[in-house]
Structures are given as structure tokens and as C-alpha cells.
Image (spheres, rainbow, N blue to C red):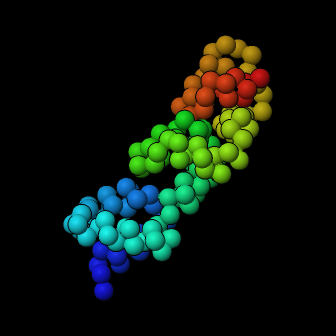
Amino acid sequence: MNPTRDKALYLLARRDHSRRELSQKLSQKGFVSSTIQPVLDELENENLLNEDRFIASFIRSRSAKGYGPLKICAELGKRGIDHNRIRASDEWQETLWQEMAISARIKRFGEAIPTAKDKRMQQARFLQQRGFTTDQIRWALK
């Protein structure tokens, strides 16, 4: 039995992870880097550790919670995922970000589009904090 592999499998059974994220978690648990990297290579070869699957799952999860592409991209970057790899994901291409911005605005503020400038700015700031682009915010406030 390999305790590093066992812990990695335990973590992967709970949810998908990026390679960097899984490596960091194993290091925090006291496993040595020289034992972690070969285990991660082995898990990738067995398709148990799959960053493309992780990216797709992460995008679906965060977009369902109302987060926009800028925030999702930043969060994936913190998990060691390259920006180009994110953009190449099928899930990224399928997500209709303008509709997501509209949905997030409606969920938080209701159907009515505000006419008062201060209310429009409040909603725009909310969408900006959620990670939507300026064009997506404009679209959501039309």
C-alpha cells in the first residue's frame, strides 16, 4: 500500500482537483514532494487525475452559482490552470455568459431594470464583483 496514493485517491473521490491543488493538499498533509509527483503522474496516466475534467466541472459549478468568466478564470489560475487551457475547454465555449449575467442580476434584484443611475450602478457593481465583463454587464442592464 502506498499512503500517498491512498490519500490522493481519497481526495479525488470527493471531487476533481487540479494537479497543483492536489499536490499542495498532499504536501500540507506531510507527504514529501519526491513521493507526490510520481503518484500524480501515475494518477494522470490512469485518468483518475484529469485537469480537463476538473476545468469543466469547475466552470459548471461556478457559473451555476452566478459567477462570471473573469472570476472563474482567476480562480482557476490560482489552482494552477493555464489561461489558454481554460479558454479551450468545451464547457467555457458552451456557456452563454451574457445570459448568465442577466440571470445573476434577476436572481439578486428581480426582473425590473432600474432607471435610476444609482440603482443601475449598484447592479453593475454587483455583476462586476461576480466577474462579468463590461459588455456582459451592459447587456444585462438593457
Quadrant of residue 140 in the image?
top right
Where is residue 59 shown, x and y percent of the image? 59, 50
Total tally of numbered discs in the picture: 0
Where is residue 110 shown, x and y percent of the image? 73, 34
Kindly identify the residue that appears in the image at 42 percent across and 71 percent down: 43
Quadrant of residue 118 in the image?
top right
- The answer to whether residue 96 shows anywhere in this view is yes
Q: Where's the N terminus, which quadrant?
A: bottom left
Q: Is residue 87 above or below residue 38?
A: above
Left or right: residue 14 versus residue 88 is left
Kindly identify the residue that appears in the image at 61 percent across and 28 percent down: 133
Which of 15 and 94 lies nearest the eye of the viewer? 94
Q: Where's the C terminus, which quadrant?
A: top right
Kindly identify the residue that appears in the image at 62 percent across and 43 percent down: 66
Where is residue 126 shown, x and y percent of the image? 58, 29
Left or right: residue 130 versus residue 8 is right
- The answer to whether residue 13 shows anywhere in this view is no
Where is residue 27 shown, x and y percent of the image? 26, 62
Which of 42 and 26 lies nearest the eye of the viewer? 42
Q: Residue furthest bottom?
A: 1
Quadrant of residue 125 in the image?
top right
Kindly identify the residue that appears in the image at 54 percent across and 54 percent down: 55
Left or right: residue 38 versus residue 79 is left
Q: Is residue 38 above or below residue 51?
A: below
Q: Is residue 99 above or below residue 76?
A: above
